[in-house]
């Protein structure tokens, strides 16, 4: 065992002996060290391959979980600072009278006002869920420049009272084409609503929700006047667009003051705050997902640390032989840390590369709840940072043990 350690150390480390380092540039000295670190990494191909694969799976799981968390906040991130939402101060479940519209339009600083109602209709059956809104088309679309719609389709949508607008992903999901009939059966709103697809929008930004269906509020209101008059002439919320972001706070205060002590008092907040209120309803789930994502990293950290500890124990004789050749403690520590970083980075980069096709194969049932399901740059940067951190942490203790190895005791153990 002693002679094998000396032969291996002499064969693979002689070119990088410290005695010659003073005569070469730092770049020339670094090249043989990197070469030797790589040889150490692939000395046990199966062990290295399995460790890399385990690291890749862990980073893949971490990135997918972080992608789900990011998609949960997609609505908040896509919010505009010039859009406000005015709703009933008690709850979003309570509507507001349409008669509030002129008063809100008269508030100084308001550029435009639209209104919407959440429509919980059934398409085919309850399994086929997607967001549906009865809204003041096409005026409300002016507040959403991120919805890209061809002008001919906009015109057709405005002229047809039963016309509706669908996102590209939603249309692709059901194979809809312009002119197709879409029948929604009301749940909260009684009746059957026969819509005609007149426009399909694409998102300007990557996080734009392309899974929604919007149709004319007037069509809904006309039907309610016939089948449920007490529900007519009401809206779920008003979408207020202000001229500048700095006007959001004073305009919100003026709107709420206008309806103070009324039968339906209002709460006006930014679109981001409005979206955030929905996210907070599921905060416990978000915390659980984030905890699991970090637990996955903790598991792979233990696996990689164990691998590096095994490698260090197997090479005690080699480290002792290297010290007899003039290698210092920091040289040995650098070789161990370099090997750990190579394994973690190879696995991390592989996991990041697999994240993109993995997101694409998410089932439609998941995508419909997370329309912004994309691997963001922040997620990629976090995954890469985690890989580096795992590599460093896993190699610290083995590197410290290798740096402190005593020549006599190490050779006695392998002798």
Image: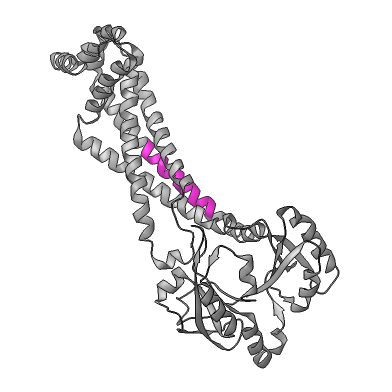
152, above or below 6, in the image: below
Residue 36 sits inside the magenta stretch: no
Most extreme residue toward the front, as rendered? 152
Query: Residue 218 in the image: x percent, y percent?
Result: 65, 83
Most extreme residue toward the bottom, as rendered? 226
Query: Residue 268 in the image: x percent, y percent?
Result: 74, 63
Q: Quadrant of residue 243?
A: bottom right
Q: Quadrant of residue 284?
A: bottom right
Left or right: 176 with respect to 251? left
Is residue 390 among the parts visible in the rendering? yes
Q: Nearer the viewer, residue 284 or 265?
A: 265
- Residue lying at 60% horizontally and 87% vertically, measured from the top left: 190
- Residue lying at 37% horizontally and 51% vertically, measured from the top left: 355
In which quadrant will I find the C terminus? top left
Most extreme residue toward the right, as rendered? 261
Left or right: 281 with respect to 382? right
Q: Nearer the viewer, residue 242 or 381?
A: 242
- Residue lying at 41% horizontally and 44% vertically, measured from the top left: 296
Is residue 404 among the parts visible in the rendering? no
Q: Which residues are magenta?
A: 286-301
Q: Nearer the viewer, residue 88 or 298?
A: 88
59, above or below 25, in the image: below
Left or right: 376 with respect to 90? left
Q: Main secondary structure of the magenta part?
A: helix
Left or right: 269 with respect to 184? right
Query: Residue 139 in the image: x percent, y percent?
Result: 65, 73
Query: Residue 385 in the image: x percent, y percent?
Result: 44, 37
Q: Nearer the viewer, residue 39 or 181?
A: 181
216, above or below 368, in the image: below
């Amino acid at each position: 065992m002693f002679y094998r350690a000396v032969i291996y150390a002499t064969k693979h480390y002689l070119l990088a002996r410290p005695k010659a380092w003073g005569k070469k540039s730092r770049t020339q000295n670094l090249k043989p060290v990197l070469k030797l670190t790589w040889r150490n990494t692939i000395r046990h191909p199966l062990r290295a391959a399995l460790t890399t694969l385990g690291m890749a799976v862990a980073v893949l799981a971490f990135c997918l979980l972080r992608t789900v968390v990011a998609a949960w906040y997609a609505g908040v991130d896509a919010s505009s600072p010039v859009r406000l939402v005015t709703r009933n101060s008690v709850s979003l479940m309570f509507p507001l009278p349409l008669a509030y519209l002129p008063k809100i339009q008269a508030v100084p600083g308001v550029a435009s006002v639209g209104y919407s109602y959440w429509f919980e209709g059934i398409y085919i059956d309850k399994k086929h869920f997607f967001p549906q809104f009865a809204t003041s088309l096409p005026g409300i679309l002016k507040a959403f420049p991120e919805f890209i719609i061809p002008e001919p389709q906009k015109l057709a949508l405005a002229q047809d009272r039963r016309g509706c607008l669908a996102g590209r992903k939603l249309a692709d999901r059901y194979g809809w084409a312009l002119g197709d009939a879409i029948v929604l059966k009301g749940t909260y709103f009684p009746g059957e609503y026969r819509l005609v697809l007149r426009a399909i929008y694409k998102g300007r930004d990557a996080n734009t929700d392309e899974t929604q269906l919007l149709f004319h509020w007037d069509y809904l209101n006309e039907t309610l006047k016939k089948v449920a008059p007490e529900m007519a002439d009401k809206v779920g919320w008003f979408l207020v667009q202000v001229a500048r972001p700095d006007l959001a706070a004073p305009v919100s205060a003026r709107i709420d003051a206008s309806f103070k002590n009324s039968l339906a008092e209002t709460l006006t907040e930014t679109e981001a705050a409005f979206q955030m209120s929905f996210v907070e309803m599921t905060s416990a789930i978000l915390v659980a997902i984030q905890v699991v994502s970090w637990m996955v990293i903790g598991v792979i950290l233990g696996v990689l640390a164990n691998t590096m500890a095994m490698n260090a124990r197997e090479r005690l004789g080699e480290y002792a032989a290297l010290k007899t050749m003039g290698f210092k403690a920091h040289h040995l520590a650098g070789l161990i840390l370099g090997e750990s970083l190579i394994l973690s980075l190879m696995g991390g980069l592989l996991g990041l590369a697999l994240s993109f096709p993995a997101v694409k194969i998410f089932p439609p049932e998941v995508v419909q709840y997370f329309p912004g399901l994309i691997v963001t740059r922040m997620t990629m940067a976090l995954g890469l940072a985690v890989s580096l951190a795992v590599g460093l942490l896993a190699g610290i203790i083995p590197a410290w043990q290798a740096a402190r190895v005593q020549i006599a005791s190490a050779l006695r153990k392998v002798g």
